[in-house]
Image (spheres, rainbow, N blue to C red):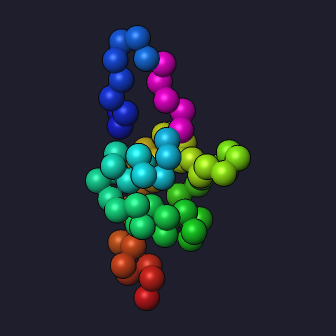
Amino acid sequence: MLNKQTETEAPRLAVSVSEAARMADLSRRSIEMYITLKLLPSVKVGRRRLVRVRDLERFLSADKPSASWVRQ
């Protein structure tokens, strides 16, 4: 599983774009690009953009083009 948690913490359902980038070892810009292209689902909560952990796991388990290739 991607997220590390202590025994007392509840599992996180969603993370910020920056945290999703850290978890995936990708740049924030790459995550934003995949969200813009609708390759990675996200939700807007107030002013925040969140990525569901399960969507990030699903995204990472599938083969995806690199963000630099997608921009061309």
Q: Which residue lies furthest to the left in this view?
A: 25
Secondary structure mostly seen in magenta is: loop
Position of 8 with respect to 40 (left or right) is left
Position of 26 with respect to 43 (left or right) is left
Position of 29 with respect to 4 (left or right) is right
For the residue pair 2 and 16, the one nearer the viewer reads as: 16
Residue 18: x %, y % from top left: 42, 52
Q: Residue at x 57, y 47 (%)?
A: 50
Residue 69: x %, y % from top left: 38, 81
Residue 28: x %, y % from top left: 40, 61
Q: Is the residue 58 above or below the residue 12 in the image? A: below
Q: Which residue lies furthest to the right in this view?
A: 46
Q: Give the range drawn in magenta.
A: 10-14
State which quarter of the image contains the N terminus: top left
Q: Residue at x 41, y 66 (%)?
A: 30
Q: How many labels does the image show?
A: 0
Q: Is the residue 23 above or below the residue 64 in the image? A: above
The answer to if 11 sits in the magenta stretch is yes
Residue 27: x %, y % from top left: 34, 62
Q: Can residue 55 be seen in this view?
A: no
Q: Residue furthest bottom?
A: 72
Q: Residue at x 33, y 29 (%)?
A: 4
The answer to if 3 sits in the magenta stretch is no
Q: Can residue 2 be seen in this view?
A: yes
Position of 26 with respect to 35 (left or right) is left
State which quarter of the image contains the C terminus: bottom left
Q: Is the residue 48 above or below the residue 10 in the image? A: below
Q: Residue at x 56, y 71 (%)?
A: 37
For the residue pair 63 and 11, the one nearer the viewer reads as: 11
